[in-house]
Amino acid sequence: MKTVYSPIQDGIEKTLESVHYAEAKPPTQLSGLVHCFWELKTETDLDDDFHLHVLPDACVNILFNQVKPEIAGITALRTTFEVLNLGTSFHYMGIQFLPGVWQGNREEIVDSYVGTPYVGELPLVETARQLTELDFGAQQTIMSRLVQRLVEDQLVAVNSVTEKILTNLDNIQTVADMAALNQMSTRQLQRNLKQMTGFTPHDLLKVLRLQQSFKQDYLMSYTDQSHFIHSFRKITGYTPDKYAKKFGV
């Protein structure tokens, strides 16, 4: 089953011309696991520190620092935004996994800036060093190999519960809908999602609704405009209009 979930990129102010962001879809055999491979870097040194406005999307990212390859990590946000100060010069690469597929050690996941050397058991530093000096196309091959290794080690796998949710988002309005789709009780869904993703069904639904609101009429996900604006501001820190004016979406 092919997912249709496509979270938006994190917030980069429209006025910044020296910050480059690119993403690429994974090979077909990895499309049920990886949303994209991505790159974020400065083209020239900036006059002021750059602040990345990161939105929750229920995805897990493996991040590589290409300036200091020993710095790497696994990141994910919960239900609200995070503003990361990346300084005036940076170069990051990453693998964005779809919600629910990460089966590795959840205690390794951080929800803020990754600024220290990686000391875990995964070959993240080794991979970061292989990525250095390659162009984005060649880097995707290296990152695909890492994903394949994680699959073989059973650290990444298709999650049938979240896959059903992601491919039927337009038909989901409530947690009860999510449970019925998976032929579970709401209690069973609660236990399953919490164990496999760290999210409660309610929190996951909030994040997915927010992401969908960037792609379609908000009334398809929210009961009314007031509900939409309140939820949007709580998760992003902005009203919808102010967010659209400040960031490229």
Image: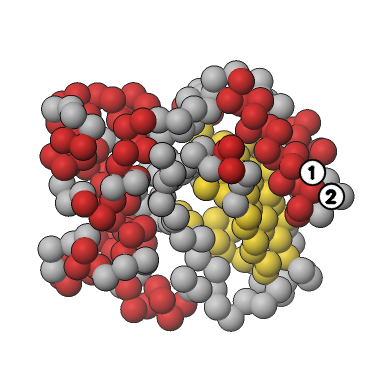
Q: What residue is at 17 percent from the left and 72 percent from the top?
A: 225
Height in image: 152 above or below 6?
above
Determine the secondary structure under disc 2: loop
Q: What residue is at 52 percent from the left and 47 percent from the top?
A: 35
Near mark 2 (Cα within 10 A), the count class, few <14, some 14-19 or many ≥20, is: few
Classify the position of the N terminus by image quarter.
top left
Total labels drawn: 2
Q: What residue is at 41 percent from the left and 34 percent from the top?
A: 100
Task: Residue 173: give x, y in percent of width and height.
Answer: 17, 51
Quarter residue 241 falls in = bottom left
What amino acid is at disc 1? Leu
Height in image: 47 above or below 139?
below
196 vs 116, left or right, is left
Q: Determine if residue 69 is in view.
A: no
147 vs 129, left or right, is left
The image's mark for residue 131 is 1
Height in image: 192 above or below 173?
above
Front one among 78 and 166 = 166
Task: Residue 56: give x, y in percent of width and height.
Answer: 41, 51
Front one among 147 and 210 = 147
Question: Circles 1 and 2: CB distance less than 8 Å?
Answer: yes
Q: Residue furthest right?
A: 133
Near mark 1 (Cα within 10 A), the count class, few <14, some 14-19 or many ≥20, is: many
Task: Residue 96: give x, y in percent of width and height.
Answer: 55, 45
Determine the secondary structure under disc 1: helix
* Residue highlighted by disc 2: 134
The image's mark for residue 203 is none
Height in image: 148 above or below 82?
above
**Alpha-carbon distance for marks 1 and 2?**
6 Å
Task: Residue 157: give x, y in percent of width and height.
Answer: 49, 27
